[in-house]
Amino acid sequence: MAEQVLRHIPVMLGEAVEGLAVRAGGRYLDGTFGRGGHARAVLSRLGPDGRLLLMDRDPAAIATAQAEFAADARVSICHANFSSLAEWDETAAGLDGVLLDLGVSSPQLDEAARGFSFMADAPLDMRMDPTQGESAADFLARADEREIADVLWVYGEERFSRKIARAIVEDRAGHPLTRTGELAGLIERVIGRREPGKHPATRSFQALRIQVNGELDSLRQGLASALERLNVGGRLSIISFHSLEDRAVKLFIRDHSGRVQGSRRGPPVAAAPARLAAVGKAQFPSEAEQAANPRSRSAVLRVAEKLS
């Protein structure tokens, strides 16, 4: 565990924490603790009256949080999806900032047994919380061809989603897919290597991970809960790693900004009172960070402040 903590490199650490505008006596929530890189940076800026709330759905992440922070009276820890943050009593007093580092964490990818990666053969699991819900293998065993194709297309933008889904359904009739290597091999056999430097299973693995963990639904619910719990002047600081996440965050901020909504084909829709304001524009990792940490290359940071 200590080795994982040392190897983990938080993405856009300085920018994300700066976005929170941390005050020494404020109350902040890190809803995706991971291995604690962002949390440590926030805690270093808090005084004795500050408060840091830590959440993660991954039991391994919570074990790390408990080992390192349980003795700190400023810290409270909850094993749960950040989508349920408003249900945690600790958030009822209001929050001055919420930080979310979305998607799969580096330790989850690096631990082959979790089944997130096609780089090593392992059980086809992909659950961020292995104690709940169905695994990727379970989903592929029960879903029909159309549902599998829809997931690969919508969540992975996989052009060959129907072809892959058809092959999965045909193969599982004789041999259920239970290993990452089996699925990656099937996809490569069906569509070949069409993009230099990119494994043909990349989009499908992303799509299945999003499906299994309900990531987009969790994000939408978590954003709404965070807005309700934020104090006026409180900040959202959110790092996304693919276009579906970033679009959801961007639209959430826009839809609560008080702008008049509508289209060129219809009359404007009366705007609701502004509750959020974007703080600056979308931010991206520097070239130096991308070179040092290739997993940061797709990251996008958006910050917003609660107005009312």
Image (tube, rainbow, N blue to C red):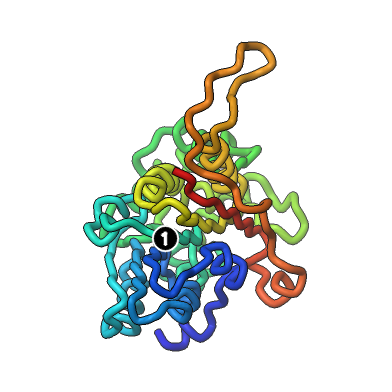
**Residue 51: x percent and y percent?**
34, 71
> Tag 1's secondary structure?
strand
Q: Residues within 10 Å of mark 1 (few under 14, many from 20)?
A: many
> In this image, 193 relative to 50: left or right?
right
Give the quadrant of residue 198. Answer: bottom right
| Residue at point 69%, 65% (across, down) | 285
> In this image, 126 relative to 283: left or right?
left
**Residue 135: x percent and y percent?**
35, 53
Q: Is residue 123 visible?
A: no
| Residue at point 52%, 63% (across, down) | 20
Name the residue carrying label 1: 96
| Residue at point 67%, 69% (across, down) | 294
Q: Amino acid at mark 1?
A: Asp
Instruction: Note whether 166 is above or below 139 in the view shown.
Output: above
Query: Residue reaching furthest left?
Result: 89
| Residue at point 57%, 38% (across, down) | 254
- Camera-side residue of 168 and 9: 9
- Camera-side residue of 49 and 222: 49
> In this image, 281 relative to 92: left or right?
right
> In this image, 293 relative to 274: left or right?
right
Q: Is residue 303 visible?
A: yes
**Residue 116: x percent and y percent?**
48, 62
Instruction: Note whether 191 is above or below 47 in the view shown.
Output: above
